[in-house]
Image (cartoon, rainbow, N blue to C red):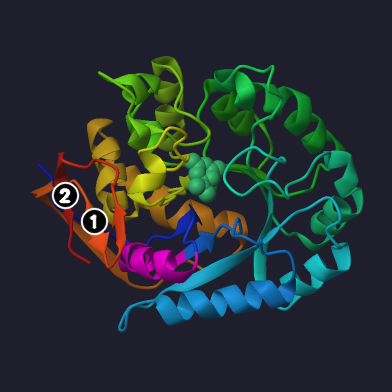
Amino acid sequence: MTTQITIRRPDDWHVHLRDGEMLKAVVGHTARQFARAIVMPNLTPPVVNVAAGLAYRDRIVSAVPAGMDFTPLMVFYLTDDADPAEIARGYEEGVFAACKLYPAHATTNSAHGVTDIRKLTGVLETMQRIGMPLLIHGEVTHREVDIFDREAVFIEQILAPLVRDYPALKIVLEHITTAEAADFVAESGPQIGATITPQHLIINRNAIFDGGIRPHAYCLPVAKRERHRLAVRKAAVSGSPKFFLGTDSAPHEIGRKESACGCAGIFNAPYALESYLQVFEEEGVLDRFEGFASEHGPRFYGLPLNEGTVTLQREEVSVPEKIVDGDITLVPFHAGETLRWRFIG
Ligand code: DOR
Ligand code: ZN
């Protein structure tokens, strides 16, 4: 039995680090495990120009605990009136690694998101030309579409035509949750990739209603039925370079989760690698973990692989019910459970 596993240092290709006190409370959890992370720009106000990207990057770097080596990769938040020249400048100057498309009102702080993708013609042409990746929250927002169908409908109505119209545009379909998404990405060209969260590999939608409403199992896109979880899991462990690690760790203060209208988001950063590794072990493919965690992402983005390694050891780890930092209390993914691997560093 494998008792220890050492891999090249991994990256998180999708994380919410927030700002202010919350940023200070959470960034160390990500920086401890990952060398780099693609940092989501859904702040209030969102990151919509080069100056805002630079200022947010500085705030993140200042919040990283001393002695940790961590590089945030910044993302431009697309709005209906996003300026192609500003985006190109931000990419060429190394400020932004990608742009994020939130359909308006799809999720937390997406009110400024894009109302109609046809408004982005100039932006998408520019991104395609300069090779800048487009990161997509792939859900339609129409109220009449069932919440469990929103990803599949987005793929059919928006993503498939987009890929056809911009055949060289690099696209990451973020946090995929369905068989339709896994199939679409697998069958597309090498310019289309996807991130996968730990929760979508581990829970299905029953977890949200397990003996009562479970707000800490609620995120967007919402977990789907079991057959979808199995399809996403198969994609993650397939060894295909199109699928890579992106936690979508999305912390919300406990009171904003345990509420009559609880926020979407699962805070999985503290035990992210332990959580993913358990899945690769259960599937009998520990040898594919390094590709998913440390190689496929940088290759897709055209960035160098990290130097150095991290080690996880087979040893039981009890996940606390709560993580408290000053006035902020967070409930981590796997709260109260015992995991099988310990992150050594
Ligand atoms: O669950 C989610 N939380 N999904 C998102 O798309 C946004 C995120 C957040 O910012 O809280
Ligand atoms: Zn996210």
Q: Is residue 11 above or below residue 85?
A: above
Q: Residues within 10 Å of mark 1 (few under 14, many from 20)?
A: some
Amino acid residing under circle 2 = Pro
Residue drawn at 73 percent across, 70 percent down: 91
Query: In the image, is 101 to the left or to the right of 226?
Result: right
- Residue 136, which numbered label? none
The kind of secondary structure the magenta stretch mainly shows is helix
Horizontal placement of 245 versus 275: left or right?
Answer: right
Residue found at the very far front of the displayed protein = 260
Tag 1 and tag 2, C-beta contact below 8 Å: yes
Q: Which residue is mark 2?
A: 320
**Front residue of this view, candidates 192 and 65:** 65
Which image quarter holds the C terminus? bottom left
Name the quadrant of the N terminus: top left
Q: Which residues are magenta?
A: 19-36
Q: Does the image show residue 156? A: yes
The residue depicted at 36 percent of the width and 25 percent of the height is 208
Instruction: Quickly name the residue at label 1.
Output: 323
Three-letter code for the amino acid on which mark 1 is drawn: Ile
Residue 102 horizontal side relative to residue 121, left or right: left
Left or right of 200, for residue 186: right
Q: From this view, report whether residue 239 is shown above or below residue 27.
A: above
